[in-house]
């Protein structure tokens, strides 16, 4: 069977080139344009890379038109209902769901690497007391290579695996320590008798002066949040991790770069923006006027948490979190939580409005994730930190996949230059 190709013709010069079509198991095919510049002297122009596939990946598949999200082929709905976060971590790292012995070993490895070097904890004292937890996370995660440099040989598969385990295991401790430092409380050491989500909640909320018991409802809700945010294809932060990794940077530096990209309000900070929007609305009776304002292109107000660049149907993660909101708030005795009532009414009105339906602006995962985090006591500045904690396994799995890719090259996006043409320097005294 001959290779499928497309023909590109330069009408100016008459030159043509046959470019191969690259197909995956699902989703749109791609045109291999690697010879385009060499053969025709042309570049592709794609701001935001919305039509550019920069890698082949077997990790995550999204069908935005149908509202489908798969991790290694498994529907997110099945994983959310039946799996655990650490099992999802294993799946993303190794490609298949683990056997019972494999799962026991993996859990043991992660839970016994949750402590961080004491010298790393002293690193926190260099930050201002009121530093944003994400600022701390960027710095501390980047500094891990100074404390765990025994596993930074990126060409050694075993080193890559050890680094992956360390990042997944230590990220909750680093996140909780970032919060503790920001409020002036002592750090809490992990407890290996607890699960991944329970351990984080304890290290974040416990104090040495009194016992702390993790609420099962909060742990279940956090576990679900972690699963749903574990990976999401080639988004801004994941692409950043891959781009940093393409230079040969160590994995800790790459994940730190991803955290920096995630911090942006258009990416990981969106669920925080949803909460602030709901707090602005306050009374569900005021929603119609805010809907009207959102439709006015001259009004700066925007309805946060609606629409997605990829999903043109209801975000499948939002469906899962919507029910989780009901279950969590009912179990913890906050069934009439004002923000959730406002969110439900906002969703109801918006989904009956032709403006939103025609533009396919459905609630996305950020619409409900912020409500869940707030309900279990997570302060708003920590929202994006938890997103980073959940996404670490996705970043690491993407990085490991890239390191094993024979086609991998250092990232070097090109440009269409629009500045001045060549001009000669004029001495200062001759310039008018």
Image: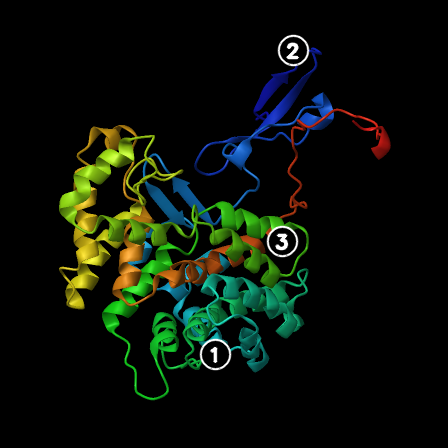
Between 31 and 352, the one lying in front of the other is 352
Figure quadrant of the N terminus: top right
Q: CA distance from mark 2 to mark 3?
A: 38 Å
Q: Mark on residue 426?
A: none
Q: Earlier in the sequence, mark 2 or mark 3?
A: 2
Between 62 and 134, the one lying in front of the other is 134
Q: Earlier in the sequence, mark 1 or mark 2?
A: 2
> Mark 1 highlights which residue?
112
Which mark's residue is nearer the viewer, 1 or 2?
2
> Mark 2 highlights which residue?
11
Q: CA distance from mark 1 to mark 2?
A: 63 Å
Circle 2 SS class: loop
Circle 1 SS class: loop
Q: At 48% from the left edge and 71% from the top edge, which residue is drawn?
A: 174
Q: Is residue 10 above or below residue 169?
A: above
Q: At 15% from the left edge and 67% from the top edge, which residue is drawn?
A: 333
Q: Position of residue 214 (x, y in %)?
A: 28, 76
Circle 3 SS class: helix
Q: Earlier in the sequence, mark 1 or mark 3?
A: 1
Q: Mark on residue 245?
A: 3
Query: From where the camera sits, is residue 255 visible?
Result: yes
Which mark's residue is nearer the viewer, 1 or 3?
3
Query: From where the camera sits, is residue 427 visible?
Result: no
Dot 3: within a 10 Å radius of its alpha carbon, few (fewer than 14), some, or many (20 or more) residues? Answer: many
Figure quadrant of the C terminus: top right
Q: At 51% from the left edge and 57% from the top edge, which residue is drawn?
A: 259
Q: Position of residue 321 (x, y in %)?
A: 26, 54
């Amino acid at each position: 069977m001959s290779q499928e190709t497309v023909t590109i013709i330069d009408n100016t010069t008459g030159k043509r080139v046959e470019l191969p079509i690259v197909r995956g198991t699902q989703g749109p095919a791609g045109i291999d344009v690697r010879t385009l510049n060499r053969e025709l002297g042309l570049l592709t122009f794609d701001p935001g890379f919305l039509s550019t596939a920069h890698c082949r990946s077997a990790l995550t598949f999204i069908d935005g038109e149908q509202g489908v999200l798969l991790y290694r082929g498994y529907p997110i709905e099945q994983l959310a209902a039946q799996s655990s976060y650490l099992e999802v971590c294993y799946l993303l790292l190794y490609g298949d769901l683990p056997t019972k012995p494999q799962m026991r070993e993996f859990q043991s490895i992660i839970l016994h690497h949750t402590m961080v070097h004491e010298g790393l904890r002293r690193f926190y004292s260099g930050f201002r007391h009121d530093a944003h937890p994400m600022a701390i996370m960027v710095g501390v995660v980047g500094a891990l290579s100074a404390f765990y440099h025994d596993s930074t040989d990126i060409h050694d598969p075993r080193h890559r695996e050890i680094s992956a385990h360390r990042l997944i295991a230590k990220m909750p401790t680093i996140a909780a320590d970032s919060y503790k430092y920001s409020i002036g409380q002592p750090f809490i050491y992990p407890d290996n008798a607890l699960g991944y989500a329970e351990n984080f909640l304890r290290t974040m909320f416990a104090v040495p002066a009194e016992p702390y018991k993790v609420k099962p409802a909060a742990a279940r809700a956090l576990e679900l949040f972690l699963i749903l945010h574990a990976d999401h294809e080639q988004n801004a932060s994941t692409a950043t991790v891959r781009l940093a990794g393409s230079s040969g940077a160590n994995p800790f530096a790459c994940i730190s770069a991803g955290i920096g990209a995630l911090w942006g309000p258009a990416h990981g900070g969106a669920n925080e923006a949803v909460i602030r929007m709901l707090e602005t609305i306050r009374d569900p009776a005021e929603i119609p006027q805010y809907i009207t304002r959102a439709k006015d292109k001259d009004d700066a107000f925007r309805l946060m948490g609606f629409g997605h660049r990829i999903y043109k149907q209801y975000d499948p993660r939002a469906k899962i979190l919507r029910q989780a909101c009901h279950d969590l708030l009912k179990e913890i005795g906050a069934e009439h939580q004002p923000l959730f009532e406002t969110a439900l009414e906002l969703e109801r009105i918006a989904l009956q409005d032709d403006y939103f339906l025609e533009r396919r602006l459905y609630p996305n995962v950020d619409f409900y994730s912020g409500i869940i985090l707030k309900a279990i006591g997570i302060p708003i500045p920590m929202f994006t930190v938890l997103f980073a904690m959940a996404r670490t396994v996705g970043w690491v799995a993407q990085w490991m996949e890239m390191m094993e890719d024979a086609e991998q090259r250092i990232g070097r996006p090109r440009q269409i230059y629009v500045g001045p043409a060549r001009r000669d320097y004029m001495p200062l005294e001759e310039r008018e």
